[in-house]
Image (cartoon, rainbow, N blue to C red):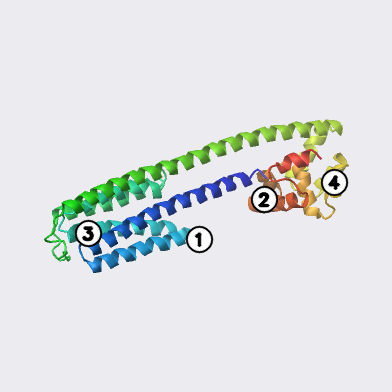
Amino acid sequence: MISEEPDKLDNEYERSYLNLINKYLVFLFLLFLFYSVFIVIFFGDALISIFLTIITLFWLFLMAMKGKTGRYRKMLRTSVIFVFVLLTFIVSFFHIYTFKNAGVEYFYFSLLFATPFFFNYREESALILIIAFVISLNFIACLYIDFDFLPKSKFFEARDFKTVKLLNILFSVGSFLMDISFITQKDDLIYGLIEDTRIKNSTIVDLQKTNTGLLKQQMLINHLTEENIREIYQLAESNSPLFYDKFQVFFPHFIPEILTINPNLIHSELHFCALMKIDFDTKKIAQCTNSSIRAVESKKYRIRKKLNIPSEMNINSFILKI
């Protein structure tokens, strides 16, 4: 079926994009796991280490959601926004918690560069700008406001921050490079989908031209006049009950040959076959039968199964050759 192809491409893109998101979540999982272990071993701050471990398990939970995004699709965008805000406040808290000397603020830039990966930067640019504003506001506020009411680490106070700062710089640069890598892969998926769609559309146009040529040849063989052709089209477009009977007069061998392939086809399916025989596509059939496109696609799918039409073959082309 022609209309099945875009759905297949969309599903393929969604699966590939979900795999990319899971890879990103693995990266976050490993990053937070490293920091939770690093802080408890080198600084002995068990409370913060436990907090980071809980966040680490949160990334595992998100990875476990793979395959369930269709069920929770409405919640997905809200959840992603929540995660970005959560990460922003975590960075802000640790920036203040480490006396603003540990280089934690560099992770603000990693968050900024991650937004185009999780959001469509053409269709959701306003949303990206809002998140960028929240991140920037936190960054500026942490630079110029003391936030004395927030707790400070007694473990970090007397420490040399050079090693920790170097570590944070390296990880923030690594995060930035990962963001660029994932954005590039996402763009490759999008452009690949666009190219596949272009090729499929080109193939569909070629098939439609071929189908039209076959139909004209068969009408000539059946000695149909221009008046006959106009009549059969008008009856079909008006959903006239006379169409099916008139069709059998103009194409006397078609219905018997279809029934030799599968005698269990019901009248409505034979009617659809007749519409496809005169080269009506899914949209045209939906219009003239007062049906939804999805209902027509379902009916064509059942016909395809009953006639054992290979999945790679266009159903209209198969019908026209009978």
Task: Please name the amino acid that badge 4 sits on.
Answer: Ile
Q: Which residue does the numbered mark 3 point to in the structure image? A: 94
Q: Position of residue 128 (x, y in %)?
A: 34, 48
Name which quarter of the figure residue 214 lies in. Answer: top right
Q: Position of residue 15 (x, y in %)?
A: 51, 51
The disc placed on residue 68 is 1
Measure how far apart labels 1 and 3 are at the Cα level: 33 Å
Q: Who's the residue at 88% across and 42% down the image? A: 253
Q: Which residue does the numbered mark 4 point to in the structure image? A: 255
Q: Are marks 4 and 2 in contact (CB under 8 Å)?
A: no
At mark 3, the secondary structure is helix
189 to the left or right of 311? left
Which label sits in the foreground, 2 or 3? 3
Measure how far apart labels 4 and 1 are at the Cα level: 44 Å
Q: Who's the residue at 47% across and 52% down the image? A: 18
Task: Please name the amino acid that badge 1 sits on.
Answer: Lys
Name the quadrant of the N terminus.
top right
